[in-house]
Image (cartoon, rainbow, N blue to C red):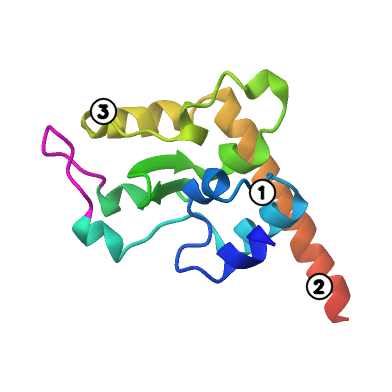
Amino acid sequence: DAISKIATMPYPTDPSHVGAFHIRCNESYIAMCCSVGPCQPEMFLFFSPKNADGRSFQKHWFSGDVWLEYSSSSDSMHCFSCRLFLPEDRYKSRKEWRNGIRKWNTTLEKIKQHSVTEVHMTSMVRWTNYKKRHSRLNLMYQM
């Protein structure tokens, strides 16, 4: 299946895979993404493409924001937790961070603004709870 295929790719959690492989954000996709973590391709960022203004994504933007991810395929940044943990219809209008941001001149401001929104905080709590729940399950299976 598609999840097995992307799991073997160099950047399995690249947000652009969702559209390219028609992936549904179900439990197995979430589990794979959480086991790998946000797409933060350090190596590619040395060669990040520049936009018309001569700007590009900067790898130091990852520091301090574990949720931030970058898609080298679509040259866009995303929010890992919002992308995976906000499936409800009431969040459908908040798709900028799930679909990707490409305007690099306002990036730091956008990251700061997004990190304090209720929507983002909700997704971070859900991600944290997911990790806690699954780490407890793993401990139970190891006994």
Residue underneath mark 3: 106
Q: Quadrant of residue 76?
A: top left
Stretch in magenta: 48-57
User: What element does badge 2 sit on?
Assistant: helix
Distance in Å between CA atoms under marks 1 and 3 = 28 Å
User: What element does badge 3 sit on?
Assistant: helix
Residue 63 in view, yes or no: no
Q: Nearer the viewer, mark 3 or mark 2?
A: 3
Q: Residues within 10 Å of mark 1 (few under 14, many from 20)?
A: few
The kind of residue on which mark 2 rests is Leu
Q: Which mark is residue 128?
A: 1
> 27 and 3: which one is in front?
3
Residue underneath mark 2: 139
Identified at 37% across, 51% down, the residue is: 73
Query: Magenta segment: does it hold 49?
Result: yes
Residue 136 in picture, x, y percent from top left: 81, 64
